[in-house]
Structure formats: C-alpha cells, structure tokens
Image (tube, rainbow, N blue to C red):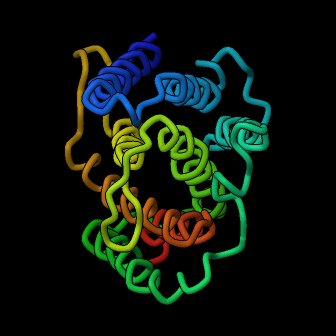
Amino acid sequence: MNGLISLAAILAILLALGGLIGIADRRNFSPTWLLAAAALVALNDALLTNVYGLLPDLIGGDWNWQGKALALAATLAIAALAPFGWQRCGLTLAQVPGSSQAALPVVLLYGGFFAAIALAFPGEPGDAETLAFQLSLPGLEEEIFYRGLLLFALVRAFAGRQRFLGVEWGWGALLSCLLFGLAHGFSYGAEGFSADPATMVLTAVPALLGVWLRLRTGSLLLPILLHNLGNSLSLLV
C-alpha cells in the first residue's frame, strides 16, 4: 500500500506540474502524451515491484533481477510500437555525426562525478552477484526507460524548445530528470511522505548529463555505459 501511495503522489506531481506548464504554453502542449507518460511511469513502477509483491520471485538473489528484467522487457516492447520506435527512443548504436568529440567532456564530467562520490563515500567490496547486477540491469533498465521511452513521451507532450549547450531542451527533458529523482529519493511510509534532498541532487546531476548525452548523440549507448560504471565504482575503488 505504501508503494501505491508513493506512486500516486509522484503521478499527481507529474500531472499537476505538466498541466500548469501546458496551460502556460497551450500551443505546444499535448495532454494525450502527458497522460501516456503518467501511464508509463505507473506500469514501470508496478513491474519493478513484481506488481507490488503479487508475482512470485522466480529468479531470487539479493537484488531485484526479476523486477528489473520485467520492467526492461515492457519498456523495449512499448518502444517497438509504431507511436514510439526504437531509434526515436535512442535504442541505436549509431551516434550523431560529430557528436563524439562534443560528448567527451560530458563523459569525463559524468565519470568524475561518480569517482568523487565513490572516494568520498567508499562502500564495502561487493560480491559477484552485486557487481554483476550493478554492471548490467540498473543502467539498461533505467536509462532505456527514463532517457529513452519516458523522455520520448514527455518531449511529445511539451513541444517547446530552447537551445542550450548544443542541444534542444524542453520541459519534457527536465520533467524526466525530476521523475528520476523522485523515484530514488521520494517515498511514503509509517511517518508519511519523505524526501531525501541529497539523494535527489545526486541523481539529478547524472540524469541531466544523461539527457544531454542522449539528445546530443541520438543514442542511449553512452548513458547506459556510464550509468553502470557509476553504480559500480564504489565497489571497485
């Protein structure tokens, strides 16, 4: 029940903020795509939690292999549908010509950010399962969903653009980063709603860098690789 309440609050934040933005810029607003984005968030949350514990965990282990795999499979299946498309969601190895050189400073910044966190807050050495998980599913599932499928839906919901730092930014890009932060640092429990500002900031920085890389290169390749590297650094240093 707590998970459902937390999800309902996140969806309310998305729809309220999205509605206000849409009212302010009606010509560039698609309510249908905003509702589609909310439905995607709800489906992703349900599958990550094995439908809130209703599905038996057939894989086991110390990490959420099954939930991540289910969510990833659903994201890939939806991204393959005609209104979306894998390539339009960034599911391509091809990079925009000339983007590799532009992306290098951001790649270094992304890696340096996580290296600094790993050095400042060293973790315990991980076992084989932990390392295998952190090097695979988090980056695949989260980047393909947040910087791929969800970003695509939100970009369609808010068509207005402003060019900044070499890419076309819109409200959809910023909302996708906000949702990523809420997924990691916002919850509901016995003491009511709680938000962890530090966690939300630490997820907002790589989320913004990941969005920039996705928009600049046209591909999710670099965001996925960097995400998994960042997750694993604290286990390796």
156 or 17, nearer to the observer: 156
Residue 85 in the image: x percent, y percent? 73, 47
Residue 224 in the image: x percent, y percent? 58, 64
Residue 79 in the image: x percent, y percent? 72, 43
> Which residue is found at the position 56% from the left and 26% from the top?
36
> Which residue is found at the position 52% from the left and 63% from the top?
214
Q: Quadrant of residue 18?
A: top left
Q: Is residue 66 in view?
A: no
> Which residue is found at the position 62% from the left and 66% from the top?
219
Residue lying farthest bottom? 101
Q: Give the answer, above or below, for where 173 lies relative to 47.
A: below
The C terminus: image quadrant: bottom left
Q: Give the answer, above or below, for where 97 lies relative to 228.
A: below
Q: Give the answer, above or below, for where 154 lies relative to 203.
A: above
Q: Quadrant of residue 212?
A: bottom left
Q: Quadrant of residue 179?
A: top left
Residue 211 in the image: x percent, y percent? 45, 59
Q: Is residue 136 in view?
A: yes
Residue lying farthest front? 27
230 or 208, nearer to the observer: 208
